Image: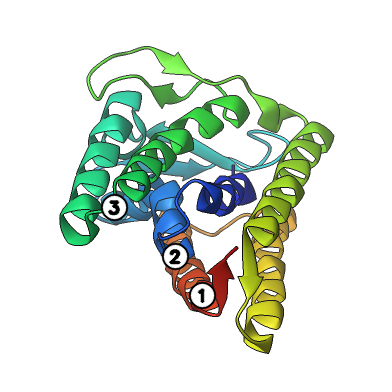
Amino acid sequence: MVIGHYAVAMAAKRVAPRTSLGTLIAAALLLDLIWPLLVLLGIEIVTITPGATAVTPLTFVSYPYSHSLLMSVVWGLLFAAGYFVARRYVPGAIALGVLVVSHWILDAVVHVPDLPLTPWGSTRIGLGLWNSLPLSLGVELVLFAFCVAIYVGTTSRRDSTGTWGLALMSALMLLIYVAAIFGPPPPSASAVAWTDMGQWLVVVLAAWVDRHRRAS
């Protein structure tokens, strides 16, 4: 998923209102923030295969350390523990840990069977929603709209920036999604990795927007 990960992070603001939206989104994206570094280091492998699915031309050959179920739990525990040490906020720590693991769960819905359970096992999971463009669009866009509504209902603006900043962030998220699906295939695996690291911009923007809103 793409905006599906952003969506669940925005909805999580309801259960962890004191946690910055930027931190929530960083947790939901954590596996995809680790993955490009491992690709650039040659530890994990992705190839460009136009037509691999109806949604993405990427074939995820190997990503056991960023995207196995076991490692998602490990990354989630580490992220949650680090946050708890820094903030001493239990609801936030729990939400962050769950969000990290939710990334694997949501990916398992859309990916073809390529998600490992453990770094060393051969079993691969994926329900293959990406094989249908209309279904993929429908599921992610409905989920996004629903979760944005939860965030809006959970927070109120502190100033005008809280309104137009949220609109800007939502538009950027949708633009990233549209570009990922309808843009041309990337020229190389390294280009995919560098582009994916651009999601840090979403994390920073979300933290900025959230400072201009307050929990209701």
The answer to whether the residue labelled 2 contacts the one labelled 1, judged by CB atoms less than 8 Å apart, is yes
Q: Which residue is mark 1?
A: 205
Q: Earlier in the sequence, mark 2 or mark 1?
A: 2
Q: Quadrant of the C terminus?
A: bottom right
Position of the N terminus by quadrant: top right
Query: Residue 104's spot in the image, x, y percent?
Result: 45, 32
Q: 144 and 112: which one is in front? A: 144
Residues at marks 2 and 1, CA–CA distance in whole angstroms: 7 Å
> Gap in Å between the C-alphas at discs 3 and 2?
16 Å
The disc placed on residue 89 is 3
- Classify mark 3: residues with Cα within 10 Å, few (<14), some (14-19) or many (20+): some
Q: Residues within 10 Å of mark 2 (few under 14, many from 20)?
A: many
Going by the numbered disc 2, the residue's amino acid type is Gly
Residue 99 visible at all: yes
Q: Quadrant of residue 122?
A: top left
Q: What numbered label is drawn on residue 155? A: none
Residue at (45% x, 48% y) in the render:
28
